[in-house]
Image: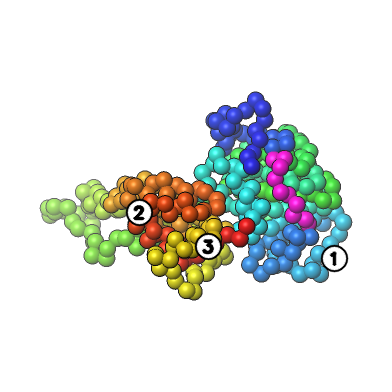
Amino acid sequence: MQLQLPASLNIQDFLDNYWQKRPLLMRNALQNHDFSLSPDELAGLACEEDVESRMVLRHDQNEWELRHGPFDEQAFSRLPDQNWTLLVQDVDKYLPEAAELLRAFHFIPSWRFDDVMISYAVPGGSVGPHTDTYDVFLVQARGRRRWQIGNRIGNPALLPDLPIRILAEFEAEQEWLLEAGDVLYLPPGVAHWGIGEDGDCMTWSVGLRAPSTAEMLGSYTQYLLDQVPEHDHYRDPSLSPQESPARILPQACSAASDALDRWLLDPDLRQRWFGCFNTELKEHLFIEPRTETVEISRIPELFRQHRWQRHPFSRWAWQEGSGSSDLYLFVCGELFELPGNCRSKLQQLCDRHPLNQDLLRDADPAFLRVLARLINENWLEPCDD
Ligand SMILES: [Mn+2]
C-alpha cells in the first residue's frame, strides 16, 4: 500500500516542493489501509503498563488538564461528552497495521521515522494550537477532524503555567475538514490545531525524528568518550620564556583545539556515531534477548520453519563504510561491519518484509554470523502471519 499523492504531483515533486517546506493536504490518499482499530481497542492499549499514553481535557478557554497513562477502565467511564482527547504513542510497535502504515511512506528514509501516534477525540477534543519540531503526516482514520493551520513560527509564545505547550496566539490561515483516508502533511514549526468534529474521530499521526543539535552534540561527545584513550593528554607546543607567565598564547589554544579536532572531526567516527545514534531505541522500549542462543549452523533450519521480521521495537539502517569495512549495519544502536559482497543481502535485511529463505541464498559466512547475533538479540524474530 502506498500513499496516493494528488494527481498533479509525483513523489519527487512532493520531496522538492513540500517536504520540510510547506503543508500539503492530500484527499483520499490512504483509501485501502486497515483503519479498523476501534476507540475501545485504543483505550485498551492506553491501559497497558508499557504503553505511553495521555489524555488532554479542556475545561475552559485557557484551562487545560493533562493526565498520564496507563489508565484504568474507570478513567474512561467518568469522562464528559465533549472536549477531551486520548493520545497513544508508538502504536506501530504494538499493532502490525500501524507498522504497515509506515511503509506507505517508503519514499522517506525509514530511520527518520519516530512512531505512529493514534489519537481519539470526542467533539471539541484537541491538544490545543501548537507547533512541533518535526514533520508529521496526519492521517484521518475514522470520523472527521477540523484542522486549522497558521504561520510557520520559530520561537512562539506559549500560554503560561500549563502542563502542555499551547500557543498564546493562534490565527488560522487555512482550515480543512479531514475525512477518513485524507492525509495532511505538516513540516516542522507550522502552527496547527485539530479539533474532533464527530464522536468517532481517530487520527493516526506519523511522526518523524528530528533530534536537536544539542542532543546530537551530547550524544556524539558521549560516544567519543568511549573511544578516546585515557593516555591521550594535552601537550605543549614548543615553548619559549614568556614576559607574562599567565598569558595563554595562541599556539597553546591551537594545541588544545587540534587535540579535540582529531576526534571531533574524524569522518569515520562521525559516520559510525550517526548510524548508532539514529537506531537507538527509546528508553522505555526494551527488547529481551533470546534465552536459548542459536548457532550459525541452525539458521537454515530456522528459516525453513518460519518467515522472519525485524522486531517491531527495533531500528535499522546501513551505510557504505569509510573505515575498516565496506559496509556498516546499524541495529538498535549497535554497529556490525560487513564486506562489500553482502550489499544486496544487507539491503534485503533492512528493507524487506517479511524475510524468507531468499536471504540465505549464497550468503557470505560473515553475513550469517551477523544474522545469528541479530536472532540471539531478538532483533530478528519469527513472524506469525
Ligand atoms: Mn502536532
Quadrant (top left/top right/bottom left/bottom right) for the N terminus:
top right
Q: Secondary structure at mark 2?
A: loop
Give the residue drawn at x 48%, y 54%: 357
Dot 3 or dot 1, earlier in sequence? 1
Dot 3 or dot 2, earlier in sequence? 3
Give the residue pinned by disc 3: 305
Q: Secondary structure at mark 3?
A: helix
Name the mark nearer the viewer: 2 or 1.
Answer: 2
Name the mark nearer the viewer: 3 or 1.
Answer: 3
Give the residue drawn at x 74%, y 59%: 42
Give the residue drawn at x 71%, y 42%: 32
CA distance for labels 3 and 1: 49 Å
Amino acid type of the residue tagged 3 in the rendering: Gln
Give how far across and how far down residue 261 sits, in percent.
29, 50
Give the residue pinned by disc 1: 78
Magenta stretch, residue numbers = 30-39
Give the residue pinned by disc 2: 364
Give how far across and how far down residue 364 sits, in percent.
35, 54
Between 373 and 28, the residue placed more toward the observer is 373
Amino acid type of the residue tagged 2 in the rendering: Asp
Give how far across and how far down residue 98 sits, in percent.
65, 52
